[in-house]
Each structure stands twice: as structure tokens, then as C-alpha cells.
Image (spheres, helix red, strand yellow):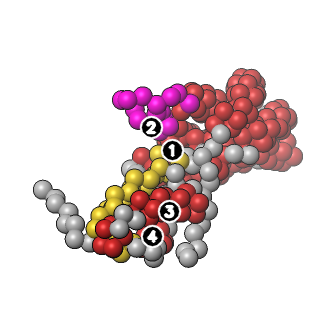
Amino acid sequence: MSSAKQTPSPPDRQRQYRGLWWAFGLNAGYMGVELAGGLITGSMALLSDAGHMLTDVAAIGLALFTSWLALKPKAHHRTYGYLRAEIIGALVSGIFLVLLCGYILVEAYHRIGHPQAIAGGPVLVIATFGLGVNVASAIMIRRNYRNNLNLEGAFLHMLADALGSVGAMVAGAVILLTGWTPIDTLASVIIAILILWGAWRLLMKSIDILMEGTPREIDYLDIQRAITSREHIVDIHDLHIWTISSGVLALSAHLQLTDECVASGHWPRCLKATQVYLQDQWAIKHTTLQTEPLSFKERYD
């Protein structure tokens, strides 16, 4: 028996997205506060954090929209429904994050050697309240984000924004205590690098799914060995494993069975047992298995 790794079951999307509405309202409201505070105080860290909060609002709105699409029923022209909309939403969120990092780094570069007067006290106060908004939003999303790439994108936005608030708080405190304004630019660069790391991972995961690569939580060779070790199954070929959407895995393969299994009419039980095995061990519910006798020869034109 193979030591299979359990994979997440398909998520309850209606339950998962309830917290997003609260996060959307919190971020939309406080974004205006940080933007006004950044313009008044002249803080680059605060303005970059406000800019990222804008992308948070857009990311959460996109997550809500794509979740609504994902819940739409299947149709003859879209046999899987709109589940992939969630992955497209995650990809767009990742792209937004990368673009934001580029903007912050360019602005930070322009400020090198050109320090600006910054009011440290207001920066510290506004950033502290912003951190509270970020943490509250992250808590609302975090429970289910690991099972849903779209939610993971929204959660990364919240986490990155929390880091932005911490950076702005540190910059405000240092300026208030020492008057050293370059800390504001330095904090912005560190924030951008941290955001970029999470954004790159999100992009790679989204691209893997859209390219129908083998899910990262699945060991292709492990499944191949496990299936061929089952009774009456001699070989397996044309094995494909992919992700339709977060938590929704699919598999297709050709199974070569012993001649005795095929001749005796036992093959339907082998087919059913293999499907049940894949669902129990790897949570793969969408399976398409073609059974073949040993004498069967594939024809490829």
C-alpha cells in the first residue's frame, strides 16, 4: 500500500468568502485615510502603504467577483463551469503585487539623495491604525486561504499591507525620535522586497494550474507506482494529473489489465476500486480511466 499524501477537499466557496466582504469594507474605508495622511505628511512609506491598500481593495473585489463566477452552474459550452476564474483572479492579483513593488522601488530610488521633510508623529499614528485594519482583514480571510489560491492572493495582499504598516510605523518612530528621514525610503524598499517574494510564489502557482501542471501537493511517480501495484493492473500510461481550480483535482489515464480480468468481466470492479482509491487517498474525484487488455495496441496518427 502506498503512503499517499492527503490533499485538501474541495472548498465550500460560499462559506469561504463571507469574511471577504468585511475585509473589503475595512480596507476601502482606511485606504482614503492613509492616502490623505501620506499627502499631508509627505511620507513615502505611508503613501506606498496607501497604494498597496488600493490594490488590496481591488484584489478583494476581484476575489469576490471570481468567487461569484465560480459558483455559476456548468453549461454545455463550459463543462467545468467557471472554476478557473478563481485562478485567473489569483494571477491578476500576483501581477498587481509585482507592479506595485516596481513602483515603490522606482520611487524609493528617486528619493535617494533627496530627503524630504516628513512628519513622524502622524505617520506613526496612521500606520498603527492601518496595521489594525490589516490584521483584522487577514484574520477574516486566513481560515481557508491555504485551500484556495484566490483567497491566498487576497491574504497575501493583507499580509503584505500589514508589513507595509509595520514599516511605516518604524519609519515614523525613527523620524520622531531621531529626525533621520532616510529610514522612510529604506522601509519602503524592504516592504517592496517582502511583497515581491510572496507575489512571485502566487504567480508561479497560478501559472502551474493554468498550464495544467501536476499539483505541487501530488507526487506523480507515487500515484503511478500505487496504481500499478494494484491487483490485475499490469501497466499505466497516458497518466495526467492537473488542477481544475483550488482543491479540485483531476486525473486521466489508460490502465492495462490482465487478460483474465478482461475476459472474466471483472474489469468494471477494478475500474471502480481504482477510482475509489484515488478519491480516498488523494481526494481526486474527477477521474477518467480507460481500461485496456494487454493485447490492445494504441494507434497514434
At label 3, which amino acid type do we have?
Ala
Q: Residue at x 74, y 33 (%)?
A: 19
Magenta residues span 71-85
Q: Residue at x 50, y 28 (%)?
A: 73
Identify the mark nearer the N-term, 2 or 1.
2
Give the residue at mark 4: 227
Q: CA distance from mark 4 to mark 2?
A: 26 Å
Identify the mark nearer the N-term, 4 or 1.
4
Please tell me how many numbered marks the rendered image carries. Answer: 4
Give the residue at mark 2: 80
Q: CA distance from mark 3 to mark 2?
A: 24 Å
At label 4, which amino acid type do we have?
Ile
Disc number lying in front (2 or 1) = 2
At label 2, which amino acid type do we have?
Tyr
Place of residue 215 in the rendered image (x, y in percent of width and height, measured from the top left): 49, 57
Residues tagged 2 and 1 counted as in contact (Cβ below 8 A): yes
Give the residue at mark 3: 273
Place of residue 32 in the rendered image (x, y in percent of width and height, measured from the top left): 71, 23
